[in-house]
Amino acid sequence: MEYNGSLPGVLIQEIGVHCGVLEEHVDYLQKQFTLITMKEFLEKKQELAEKISCIYVWGCMPKVDYHLLHSLPNLKIVANGGVGIDHLDLKLISSFGVKVTNTPNAVSNATADMAMMMLLASARNFLQGYQVAVSPETKCFPFNWYAEEVTGATLGIVGMGRIGYKIAQRARGSEMKILYYNRSRRIKDEKSVDASYCENLSDLLQQSDFIVLVVPLTKETKKMIGKKELQQMKPSATLVNICRGGVVDHDALVEALKHGVIKAAALDVTDPEPLPRDHPLLKLHNVIVTPHMGSSTRATQRLMMKDMVQSMNDAIAGRPVFNEVIAN
């Protein structure tokens, strides 16, 4: 791309492909910024380094490390698409005087929809049903089809933030009993969705028919669901993970699913992503795995982009930055 000196420079990974800026967003972005791909930057680093004031992180790319930060003397902000920021070293970025933002409000509805879809698909054996319906071997449909009832079941939400609350709203519409575990009690939220607070994670695990994980990946939450926690769940329970794959011990989950410790799992996130093609989770009949698509709707992705644009413009103008994330 030709550099437009009248517009602030924004470093992006690429356009299109897997982790690039969406092509349908490019026109909107180019009205306000000059987009500089990582390839262009590396080829003309000396010329472009001082012109870049923002890094636009989409799909966790470009990778923001010491060497990149050190090479951008006028960088003001790293704007991240999505809620999770475990791929960013906040303290390192902050040490360069650079702000970090994410897009928590934009993704809430789409991710909550995804959680309920995965819960329902797992409970009703949706994938198995589809395979029967399309199989060339099928001669008739089974009448005795075993699945789990969602209406009236107990849902345990681990993490009652924005997305957790949206999930609770949807679950209430399915007449589910709602439990939640959170670092702090959310009395106003729990009253509005008729949810009950569990002071201990074990209490929620023992009572829930479905458990949905909606926590950020931190030192405290890494592998928070392991062998001990899985054994505390009901044998009929289903685990749904829509936050980060690292929150679950995958080895322990495989063993639990193989030996009937829990009934099923539905995973929109794994660690790593994608899983190795020979990973046992991909071979189990009681697991649904999807490619981290919780926020992947056109409307949500456009909201994410616009929130990132607002944050970048705030940083460039020296205003308080929208959706700023502060390093602890």
Image (cartoon, rainbow, N blue to C red):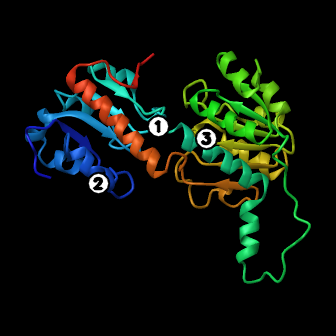
Quarter occupied by residue 92: top left
Query: Of discs 2 and 1, which sits in the foreground?
Result: 1
Q: Mark 2 falls on what kind of element?
A: loop
Q: Indicate left or right for 300 with 115 as reference.
A: left
Quarter occupied by residue 212: top right
Disc 3 residue type? Ala
- Residue drawn at x 10%, y 51% is 2
**Residue 184 in the image, given as x and y percentages of width and height:** 65, 16
Q: Which residue is mark 2?
A: 15
Q: Mark 1 falls on what kind of element?
A: loop
Circle 3 Cα neighbour tier, 10 Å, few/some/many (<14 / 14–19 / ≥20)? many
**Residue 27 in the image, given as x and y percentages of width and height:** 24, 51
Q: Nearer the viewer, residue 18 or 130?
A: 130
Quarter occupied by residue 313: top left
Mark toward the start of the polypeptide (3 vs 2): 2
- Residue drawn at x 77%, y 21% is 198
- Residue drawn at x 39%, y 45% is 302
Distance Cα–Cα, label 3 vs label 1: 12 Å
Q: Is residue 66 visible?
A: no
Q: Indicate left or right for 279 with 176 as reference.
A: left
- The quarter of the image holding the C terminus is top left
Q: Nearer the viewer, residue 59 or 129?
A: 129
Q: Which residue is mark 1?
A: 106
Q: Which residue is mark 3?
A: 112
Q: Is residue 208 visible?
A: yes
